[in-house]
Amino acid sequence: MKKIFLYILAGSLCFTACKKDDEVETYKEPEDIAVQNNYDDQAIKKFMNENYLDAQGNIKTFSTTDASDDNEKKLSDLPYETLPSGTIYIMREGAQPTTDPQTVKPDDILTMMIRANGLLAAGTDGNVNFITNLKIVNTINDNGLPLIDPTFYYAKKSIRDAATTTVAQQRSYYEIEGFNEAIQKFKAFNNLSSGNPYNLQGVILVPSRAAFARDPHYPYVGTISLRNYSFIFNFQIYGRADRPAGQ
């Protein structure tokens, strides 16, 4: 029964789902981190084959019963780039700013409409899948308002200075390196109003080695560990601003 349950769970995984950590009954951390890295890469490629972008740029899973998405392109069939870290980014055609596009710098304050999920890749009976999916943030389906300056992008000095442990005083404790790296490949819009209808610019897929890997990290999902988790981001950059000195 456990194998049947896992098969159904893996087959029905979609980006907007949110699984509880206690449902990951079969995960066993590989002793060799290279094995986990390989799981991540395989699961990300499988995800890209099973999902597409809808008319507003949302990630959607192909239906096995509805033919309306049969002509949609798989994420893997869209132009994408792979960074040295293993992070993959997809720029959605026709969704990038054309009027006064703003260059994104590493220390900018960003305003984003964004959906971010953490996913855990595992190998079972020779098959590799994402076996759990945790919501990190979802402004699109929750309050519909852009998020300003998320900590997983940039950890402010005030946050780090207030930390009581050495590890929590480091930016790497909060920031998802692969996201920070890939978001700079996109251009920001010139401060769209928060009520502007969203048109998502693209996707960033971050393997665990370009996220927290097996290092200590900020508890973004309460008591649930994000150790070995990959991350998938679906977003639009509404605006950017220079960060004040000292932040």
Image (cartoon, rainbow, N blue to C red):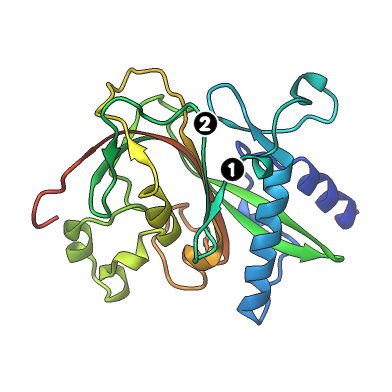
Q: Would you say 74 lies left or right of 168 here?
A: right
Expressed as whole percent of the image width and height from the top left, the position of residue 181 reads 39, 57
Expressed as whole percent of the image width and height from the top left, the position of residue 18 reads 61, 42
The crowding category of the residue bearing disc 2, from other C-alpha atoms within 10 Å (few below 14, some 14 to 19, many at least 20), is few
Q: Is 239 located above or below residue 195 in the figure?
A: below
Which structural element holds mark 2? loop
Q: Which mark is residue 45?
A: none
Residue located beneath label 2 in the image? 93
Using the image as rendered, state which of residue 36 and residue 188 is in the foreground.
Answer: 188
Image quarter hosting the C terminus: bottom left
The crowding category of the residue bearing disc 1, from other C-alpha atoms within 10 Å (few below 14, some 14 to 19, many at least 20), is few
Expressed as whole percent of the image width and height from the top left, the position of residue 143 reads 40, 25
Can the viewer see residue 23? no
Q: Which mark is residue 79?
A: 1
Quarter of the view holding residue 172: bottom left
Considering only order in the chain, which callout, 2 or 1, is on the residue closer to the N terminus? 1
Which kind of residue does numbered mark 2 sit on? Answer: Glu
Q: Residue at x 50, y 66 (%)?
A: 84
Mark 1 to mark 2: distance in Å?
9 Å
In the image as oriented, which residue stretches furthest toward the left? 245
Which kind of residue does numbered mark 1 sit on? Answer: Pro
Q: Residue at x 35, y 18 (%)?
A: 196
Can the viewer see residue 19? yes
Tag 1 and tag 2, C-beta contact below 8 Å: yes
